[in-house]
Image (tube, rainbow, N blue to C red):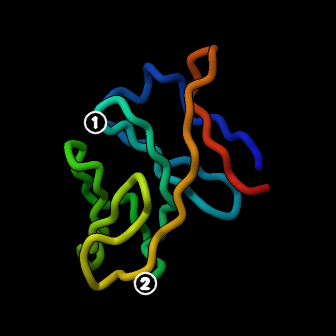
Amino acid sequence: MAEVEVAPIEELPPGTMRLVPTGAVTIGVYNCDGKLYAIEDRCSHDDGPLCEGEWEPGLCVVVCPRHGSRFDLQTGIPMSLPAFEAVPTYAVSVRSDGVVVMEVPD
């Protein structure tokens, strides 16, 4: 696994999201009421962008902008149709220097 820097934690306050390109995939990193989550920016229904849609910070849910499928940010599991397959999620943490990082496959 490779560590990818996202941003200083001050630049990702609760209720915000940041798209992070990591080479082959782009990942959305969310601060959901102080908890950090990372999910691949790809809807499992039609491979369209997922993280460009609306999201519900209070519920930690992202909504696909194309067809409205809702995904749990913690697990990547879809909560509504038409999607029925989970989207990859990634571990996120804050280093001792205050930088948000995520673990992605090499």
Question: Residue at position x 43%, y 73% from top?
Answer: 43
Could you tell me if the residues under marks 1 and 2 are in contact, i.e. CB atoms within 8 Å? no
Q: Residues within 10 Å of mark 2 (few under 14, many from 20)?
A: few
Coordinates of residue 44 in the picture (x, y in percent): 45, 78
20 up-or-down from 16: above or below:
below
* x and y percentages locating residue 45 in the rendered image: 40, 83
Q: Residues within 10 Å of mark 1 (few under 14, many from 20)?
A: some
From the viewer's perspective, tell me whether residue 65 is left or right of residue 17: left
Q: Residue at x 57, y 51 (%)?
A: 90
Callout 1: SS? loop
Quadrant location, the C terminus = bottom right
Q: Tell me the residue at 48%/79% (across/down).
A: 47
Which mark is first along the chain, 2 or 1? 1
Q: Which residue is mark 1?
A: 15
In-front residue for pair 18/94? 94
* Residue 65, numbered circle: none
